[in-house]
Image (cartoon, helix red, strand yellow):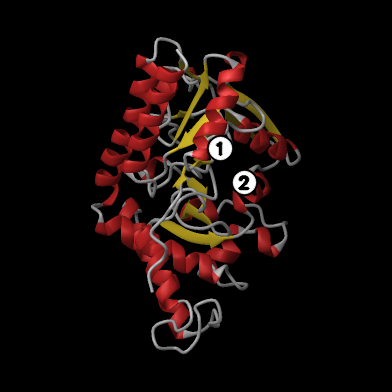
């Protein structure tokens, strides 16, 4: 049985769109997973049937991201928000500092949590301009001997994204990639630790992926709770406790889908085309629509903009919802509009939204 053919234009910022083929496969396997007579949600996480799912998801992620053998891939829980605490708990040693690059709300939250555990500072910030841009790499200031440098690769609320990353040498570089992981090729070896909530490009909510360099594990603090040690999960293949099995199954299927459509190079090309449709219309509107992010910092994942007046913006959002465009209200903290064009959002959805933008401007100019 197929899913209903009518699908909303899902531009939610997260949880976000999933590939229709993945949803259909999950539907087909939901009651009897590969001849087990059980749903994957009912399988023991110690069973051979689930172990295959688990290990294949790790293998697929390593393949797609070209993760070196010097890294561990972990499946954790608690979202990126728990990582804000786990990172300083594990790696912010007494007598050392950690630098945080401030580019939006999520880096602010990460910084606030880290302050609870040690000495942290702003390595760069674009807050004075309401986070309209990413700092120039050469303006990121950190210290030799720092515990780590932390950044957020894509900022969902403000719609900005790093294009290049600082070369930090012996200072471990840590990145929250929750909203743009798997959207383009990255050089994993630049980073000591990458973490990402799954609910944007990797799968459903409930799974947090951590990619961590093995030598960093060896430097971690030991006087912290067992469940909050990265080493606990690395030693147990992320099976120390019951993992979010269904979420990991879905993540594995999303990774298979990503490989089948051409991998990260093909995905990046498609994401660029999708975002360009909407940015081009913003730029061609003569001020009817105004982008929040500066052009050289624009996110391909989260396109943020305002409409000419508040009254028109309210009407724009109401009419868009009536037309089946879901999730385009800007974040409650800043308002405006936001189109989240993650991997599974089809090109046709972005094309339809662009046509809506054109018609709305014609009707209200």
Q: Work out whether 308 lies above or below 272.
A: above
Q: Quadrant of the C terminus?
A: top left
Which residue shows up at 64% across the image and 38% down it?
110
Please identify the quadrant where the N terminus is shown: bottom left
- Residue 101 appears in which quarter of the rendering? top right
Badge 1 marks a residue whose secondary structure is strand
Please give the label number shown on residue 148: 1
Residue 319, above or below 237: above
Q: Residue furthest front?
A: 363
* Residue 120 quadrant: top right
Mark 2 and mark 1 in contact? Answer it, CB < 8 Å. Answer: yes
Horizontal arrangement in the rendering, residue 117 relative to residue 319 (left or right): right
- Identified at 39% across, 83% down, the residue is 34
- In this rendered view, identify the residue nearer to me: 328 or 78: 328
* Left or right position of 351 against 364: left
Kind of element beneath mark 2: helix
Locate residue 143 relative to residue 184 in the image: left or right. Answer: right
Is residue 336 visible in this depiction of the protein? no
Q: Is residue 329 visible?
A: yes
**Badge 1: how crowded within 10 Å, few (<14), some, or many (20+)?**
many
Question: Compared with residue 57, is residue 365 higher up or lower down, i.e. above or below?
Answer: above
Name the quadrant containing residue 261.
bottom left
- Counting from the top left corner in percent of width and height, residue 361 is at 43, 19
Residue 7 at what x, y percent from top left?
43, 53
For residue 91, the mark is: 2
Query: Which label was assigned to residue 276?
Result: none
Q: How many marks?
A: 2
- Residue depicted at 28% across the width and 41% down the height: 270
């Amino acid at each position: 049985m197929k899913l209903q053919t009518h699908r909303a234009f899902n531009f939610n910022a997260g949880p976000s769109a999933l590939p229709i083929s993945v949803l259909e496969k999950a539907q087909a396997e939901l009651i009897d997973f590969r001849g087990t007579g059980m749903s994957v949600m009912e399988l023991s996480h110690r069973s051979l049937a689930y172990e295959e799912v688990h290990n294949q998801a790790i293998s697929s992620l390593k393949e797609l991201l070209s993760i070196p053998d010097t890294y561990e891939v972990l499946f954790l829980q608690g979202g990126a928000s728990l990582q804000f605490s786990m990172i300083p708990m594990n790696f912010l040693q007494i007598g050392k500092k950690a630098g945080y690059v401030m580019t939006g709300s999520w880096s602010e939250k990460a910084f606030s949590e880290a302050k609870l555990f040690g000495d942290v500072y702003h390595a760069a910030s674009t807050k004075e301009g309401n986070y309209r841009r990413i700092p120039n790499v050469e303006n990121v200031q950190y210290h030799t001997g720092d515990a780590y440098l932390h950044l957020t690769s894509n900022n969902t609320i403000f719609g900005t994204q790093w294009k290049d990353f600082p070369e930090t040498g012996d200072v471990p570089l840590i990145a929250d990639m929750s909203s743009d992981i798997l959207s383009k090729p990255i050089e994993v070896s630049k980073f000591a630790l990458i973490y990402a909530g799954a609910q944007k490009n990797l799968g459903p909510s409930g799974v947090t992926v951590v990619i961590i360099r093995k030598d960093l594990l060896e430097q971690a603090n030991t006087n912290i709770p067992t469940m909050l040690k990265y080493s606990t999960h690395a030693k147990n293949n992320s099976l120390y406790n019951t993992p979010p099995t269904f979420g990991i199954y879905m993540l594995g299927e999303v990774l298979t889908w990503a490989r089948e459509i051409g991998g990260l190079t093909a995905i990046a090309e498609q994401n660029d085309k999708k975002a360009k449709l909407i940015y081009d219309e913003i730029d061609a509107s003569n001020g009817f629509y105004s982008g929040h992010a500066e052009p050289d910092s624009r996110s391909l994942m989260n396109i943020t903009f305002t409409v000419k007046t508040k009254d028109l913006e309210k009407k724009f959002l109401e009419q868009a919802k009536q037309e089946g465009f879901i999730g385009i209200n800007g974040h409650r903290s800043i308002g405006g509009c936001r189109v989240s064009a993650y991997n599974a959002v089809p090109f046709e959805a972005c094309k339809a939204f662009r046509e809506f933008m054109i018609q709305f401007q014609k009707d209200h100019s």
